[in-house]
Image (spheres, grey):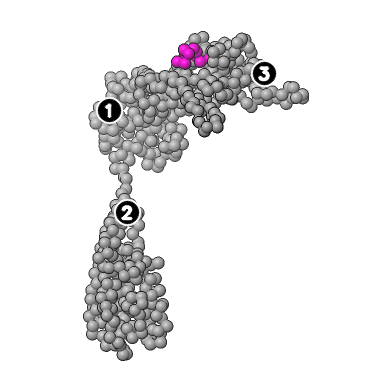
Amino acid sequence: MSTKRSYLMAAFSIAVAMVAVLAMSPDAFAAAAVHAAPAGHFDLQSLLFQATPALIALRSEHAGLMTRAAALIGTVADTTPAADVARIEREHADLVRQAETLSRRIDDEAARAVPLGPTPAPEAGITAERARSAEIMSIGTRAAMSGDDITAAINAGTTVEVFRARAFDAMAAAADRTRSGNVTITRDETQTRMSHLSDALAFRIGGAAVLLDDNGQRRAISAEARAFTDHSLAEMAGVVLNERRMPGTAAGREDVLRRAMHTTSDFPVIFESTINRVLAARYQVQAPTFREISARRNFRDFRPHDQIRVGDFPTLQKVNEAGEIKFGTFGDSKETVAVAPYAIQFAISRRMLIDDNIGAIDQVLGSYGDMVSRFEEATFYAMKALNAGKGPKLNEGAVSVFHADHGNLAAAGAGITTDALSLGRAAMRKQKNQSGALLNVQPAILLVGADQETAADRALAVITPTDAGDVNPFSKKLRPIVGPIEGNAWELYADPSVMPVFVWGMLDGYGAPRMRIENPFGVQGVGVSLEHDFGCGAIDFRGGYRNAGA
């Protein structure tokens, strides 16, 4: 409830008596009522004593000032600019000072007032109570406390000292809210211009597909960045150098580029970050097959990282009559995978830069994005092809991923037939944890090489049978993937998010290869190094099955 509304509610409780004695406006009536004695002390004679025309006018003016002061504080929000907050505070303080002056005039006028009718002697302590109420009202208003809090303190008999402490706490809390609410993170003009130049250069090199937001979704180029898209590389370098005019000769443009690269300007940073954005976009659109049969892991550094195989929680056992709970063995298997650094250098030629050959730069970045994807694919499948295609050896038993001891290698090679797929599926479902409990692993992927792609499509084709025996039990249950596997071998895999056999990853914080400018504008162009950290390995055998094929 607001302060003004609290005043009106107090006035309403004595409205009947006032109307019978004195006709006044509602605002004057409210002003008189709020300066009457506290709840429990109202009486007609006391009210008549204080209802002289001069007092009514002064109290009406005082009430108006208090209402304006409260309304002024109510206009302050977390988003109000600091300058406006300071102005409002000054105006509020001025209103409070005017109200205090009026309070003193009201006290003087009340001392000289002549009662309109016979008035009994004031009750003992009534003067002190009025002084307490007035002081609490003044303190609460200056502290911008709510009308409800002020009225509650007056009615509860709260002392001035206790209420002053509450007001101080309220002002401290309000100051904290104001400080936090008015903090604005801004970016200076130079940073904003550099961001627009980077967007414009990325748009020129890679098009709209390389403009992504923080969630990896495409975003539109801003109007400010679009204004730079018709600038050449030399003109963008000139903007960074604050050049007023661009030279018209090739030598002049080369000089601008050289100075932009060699000085402490931001152009090398803009150029490097832009080509990395384009390279990352080109890399992300690649879809190597190894990512579909393996799970991603991040690595803190280049040291070998332990990959714990979880899922061997001990099986529940019956509690005997004595209430004894048996101990189970929590088994786990630990494999090691490491990331290794890779790099290559190349050049963006002097001719490309001077000619502003954005298309050629785009082709270079696009080709390197494809190259990194193919490199990862080759590295992964080279690891998987160890031991005649059976995969690297696991620490547990020191045998390959696919091995008869693991129950996931067909005893004899066979084509991709319903019977052969059935044997593979059954072998995966029969895999057990270290406690001997069945894992019931469900195959989801059929991996084949180029020689068996047609056979895989035929084995998984959806058909409309005329006889129940002709139904294909594997249609829509397995997803075919064609990878760089030689020969007729084929393999089944569970969903890698459920039970991965292989993992791959990069260093924490990196999601793509990166380029670094090594030799700023050398004799024949810009020297650039392409760097990438990548690792892969095997961590389990229970989510896969291999058949050598026939």
What amino acid type is highlighted by mark number 3? Thr
Instruction: Evaluate if marks 2 and 1 touch, with contact meaning CB atoms under 8 Å apart.
Output: no
Disc 1 residue crowd, few under 14, some 14–19, many 20+, Cα 10 Å: many
The mark that comes first in sequence, 3 or 2, is 2
Q: Magenta segment, principal secondary structure?
A: loop
Q: Can you name the residue that lies furthest to the bottom here?
A: 118
**How far apart are the alpha carbons under marks 3 and 1?**
64 Å
Residue 177: assigned label = 2
Single out the mark in the foreground, 3 or 1.
3
Q: Is residue 13 visible?
A: yes
Identify residue for label 1.
261
**Mark 3 surroundings within 10 Å by alpha-carbon count, few (fewer than 14), some (14 through 19), many (20 or more):** some
- Looking at the rendered image, the quarter that the N terminus falls into is bottom left
- Please give the range of residues in magenta: 391-402
Q: Position of residue 481 (x, y in %)?
A: 56, 21
Rendering coords of residue 43 (x, y %): 35, 83
Using the rendered view, name the quadrant where residue 146 is placed. Answer: bottom left
Element at label 3: helix
- Is disc 1 placed on a helix, strand or loop? helix
